[in-house]
Image: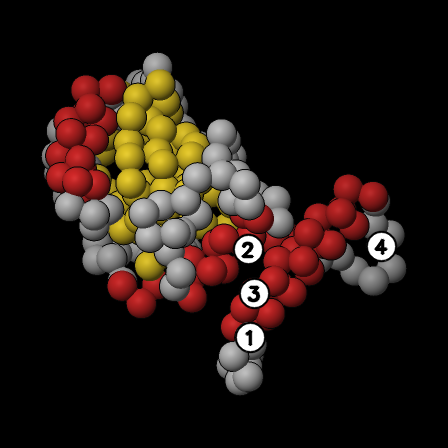
Amino acid sequence: MNKKVLIETQLFTPNKISLTEGKLSDNGNPLVEGILATVEVKNGNGRYYPKELWQREINNYMSCVKENRALGELDHPDSTIINLKNVSHNIKKIFWDGDNIMGVIEILPTPSGNILKELIKNNITVGVSSRGMGSLQQVGEVLEVQDDFELLAWDFVSTPSNPGSWMRPIKESLNESQIKNINKYQKINSIITEILCSHGSCPI
């Protein structure tokens, strides 16, 4: 079977550690904690990962964590290479909580990391997305990830993936929920613009 990039995304809800009041890393950077993945369930892409596969890959990935190089990007590419110019965070700790893979993540003071920090600080919902290489086999109603799977990284991505779907003809009135969604993404754009233009020049 041909291996391909496998990307799985779920909402990331930081818990226990607050950006403003919580624990900082040894470098003084904010930490967040939350669920990275849930195993043994059919995900939104119709894929199924056996728990023993995730256990093996987490054990392998721990070498990256211990060597302080478990890096991830903001809005990951469809690539096997981690682009250092787009790195936003570093995973400091991974552990199991039942069938949930938990992570403690250091948000780095990079351009992408600053954007991620401001989004989380302003209660903007983001997704955390695993990136790996592997092949699939149809088993009943699911695509089962095969034993050649290799975990590459966890990235942060925007959710929902298609905010443009809120566009409506001018004549069509928007309900209260749609207005709140539009206002949320206006707030995101405002935060990103403020960060990018904070040093006297504005590239956008």
Nearest to viewer (mark 1 / mark 4): 1
Residue 17 in percent (x, y) is at 48, 35
Q: Which residue is mark 3?
A: 192
Circle number at residue 198: 1
The residue tagged 4 is 172
Q: Amino acid at mark 1?
A: Ser
* Cβ atoms at labels 3 and 4 below 8 Å apart: no
Q: Position of residue 155 (x, y in %)?
A: 36, 48
| Left or right placement of residue 74 versus residue 173 in this view | left
Q: Residue at x 35, y 18 (%)?
A: 97
Q: Residue at x 41, y 44 (%)?
A: 24
Q: Earlier in the sequence, mark 4 or mark 2?
A: 2
Query: Viewer-proximal residue, 1 or 103?
Result: 103
Q: Which amino acid, by three-letter code, is at mark 2?
A: Glu
Residue toward you, 36 or 201? 201
Secondary structure state at the residue bearing disc 3 = helix
Are dots 4 and 2 in contact, CB under 8 Å?
no
Q: Residue at x 33, y 59 (%)?
A: 87
Gap between marks 4 and 2 measured at Cα:
33 Å
Who comes first in sequence, dot 1 or dot 4? 4
- Residue at 54% from the left image edge and 41% from the top image edge: 21
